[in-house]
Each structure stands twice: as C-alpha cells, then as structure tokens.
Image (spheres, rainbow, N blue to C red):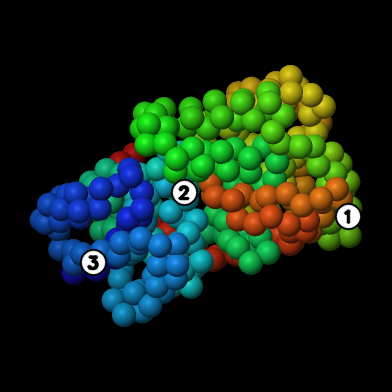
Amino acid sequence: MKRLLFVVNGRSSRIPTAEFVREAKKRLSSQDFELHFFVSQLISDYDSIVQQARNLRPDVIVVVGGDGTSQLALNSLHLAGRDCYFFPKGTANDLAQHLGHTNRWADLVRAVNQNRSRQIDLIGVNNHLLATVGGLGVGAELCNRMNQRRNASPLFSKAAKALRQHTYSLLALQVILTRQARDMRVHVQAGDKSHTFQSSALLVANQPVLAKNIFLRDSSIRNDDGLCNIFALEARSPAEMVKAFVDMRRGRLPQRTHLISAPELKIDLQDGAASFFGDGEVLQTDTQFNIRIKTNALRVLNSGVMQ
C-alpha cells in the first residue's frame, strides 16, 4: 500500500477544500493508497509539514495548489526528503508544468505506481529557497500587483482563473508601460568575475520557462545543472522593454541581455533596496542578495503523463 500525504492550500479560493478531499477519495478509491490530508490555513502551517512527514512517513507528498503554494511549502519539502508530486491548481503552475505533473488523477496514479523519482536543484536566496524563477524589478512588481489584486477582488481572482498565464502577460505590460519598476544599478559577483549594469528586469532562473510562455535564454537552463542562472535585461525605454518581452515570448534572446551562470552569485543594488520575488511570491526587500545553488535538494516523481 502506498501512503500519500496531500498538502492543500486552504486559503486559496481556487481550491474548495472539502470538495477536493471528497473528489480525491472518490477518484483514488480503487487504488491501493492510504490517503492523508494536511490543510494549511496560515503561512506558518507549512512548517508543520516536516513533522507530518516524520510521523506518517508518506511515500509521496502531493502539493495541491500553484507556484505560490509550492513556494510556501518548499523549505519543509526540502527538509522532509520525501518524493513530491505537484498537483497544479494555480494560475501559471510553472513548477508542475516543467516537471510534467498535471492535475489529472490518472497521471498522478501512474506517477505514484511507477515509483520513479529524481532529484532537482533549488536556489537559495538569502534565507529563502526557490524552485523555478525569481528576481528583481518588473517580475517582483508584477507579483506584488497580482497578489494584491487577487486578495482584494474575488472578480479578479475569477478572471485570473479564466485567463491563467495571460493574466501575467497583461499585468507585465501594464507594469512596463507605466514604469512601475525602476531601473536598478546592479553589481553581480560570480567567482572572480564582476559585472555591473543597469536593469529593470533581472531574473534568476532554475528552469527555462516563466508563466508558460516567457522563454529565458534556451533549454540549456536546467534544474539539475548545479548552476544559478542570471538573465538581466538592459532595456532603455518602455518600448524597448516591450520588444524584449515579445522576443522572449517568441523564444528569442533580446538585445542587451546579461547572461551569468555560476554555483554562487552575489547581487548588490547600488541605488537602494528592491523586492526579490521567487516562484510567484515576494520573498524579501533588501540591497544585497546571496544566491547559491543547492544541488539535489528536492526529490520529485517523474511525470505520469502517457507518452
């Protein structure tokens, strides 16, 4: 018998908890699974996942939600050391998509029964972890706006649910055209090499795709390559930033892009503090960020999608 621990974001309007629990029990009733459910109501609840995993010793931890839910659970999942499956119920679901995890019950069953997993890297940002993409400037302001509007307006939440990743594209254009993200003077130390430049959009990537249709560099960015990858745009006007945004959607490398890869990086902002986002959440506001790869930090099930 396989033991599954479902971690469900009880604060999300996307996931009616009682309904999800009933559906999970119904859909998985024919499987030789023992189901347990952990419903988070507070951000601090996610710290309890480690103790739940130690008590239950699940074969798989199934995280139900979007990238924000995964971000809140990430440190505990890392410490728990169990196989993880990300059951996407969010807006963009970048981590789940990159791993090939879906919200189809048959795919979850297949992945659990195949029992094949691998280890992926995580990126440490000061005292935080991220699994997908993070950074400074446009991305952080976009996350801030997205979360504020989602919390303030049920109507916006419904629209975001319908539009999914296109919501991020529309908000990104608004942030760019209204100059809400300031140009930053950035200094990056990567080993014995120094880089200094202006940027209003700096990304630290652990995978090559953001919001399903923003392509960073190329497929050489991997979540098991032992590297932190910086992708920074030095656009000089909103029009140039919009063009860079369009290029990235088409899989092209924009002009005046700074590409830096190393196991450890230090970012210094020379003209004041800025917010750093990761996995769809604003993590911290500071002038200095120590970026370090954490190799083989998370165990994830292989995709259960039929080829």
Horizontal side, residue 146 vs residue 55: left or right: right
Residue position for label 1: 193
Around disc 2, counting alpha carbons within 10 Å, would you say few (fewer than 14), some (14 to 19), or many (20 or more)? Answer: many
Residue 222 or residue 171, whichever sits in front: 171
Whether 81 is drawn above or below 204: the answer is below
Q: CA distance from mark 2 to mark 3?
A: 22 Å
The type of residue carrying mark 1 is Lys
Q: Which residue is mark 3?
A: 36
The tag earlier along the polypeptide, 2 or 1, is 2
Label 2 with label 3: CB-CB less than 8 Å:
no
**Residue named by callout 2:** 67
In this view, the mark in front (2 or 1): 2
Residue 251 visible from this viewpoint: no
Q: Nearer the viewer, mark 3 or mark 1?
A: 3
Residue at image coords 61%, 26%: 174
Residue type at the position of mark 3: His
**Badge 2 amino acid:** Asp
- Return the x and y of residue 41 as percentages of the image width and height: 35, 60
Q: Residue at x 80, y 33 (%)?
A: 234
Q: Quadrant of the C terminus?
A: top left
Residue 35 image position (x, y, % from top left)? 21, 64
Q: Residue at x 82, y 55 (%)?
A: 268
Q: Could you classify mark 3 by the number of other residues whose Cα lies within 10 Å: few (under 14), some (14-19), or many (20 or more)?
A: some
Give the vertical position of 143 relative to 165 (above or below): below
Q: Marks 3 and 1, Cα distance to the nearest angstrom?
A: 49 Å
User: What residue appears at the point 22 percent right and 50 percent down from the top-left corner?
Assistant: 20
**In which quadrant of the rendered image does the N terminus lie?**
bottom left
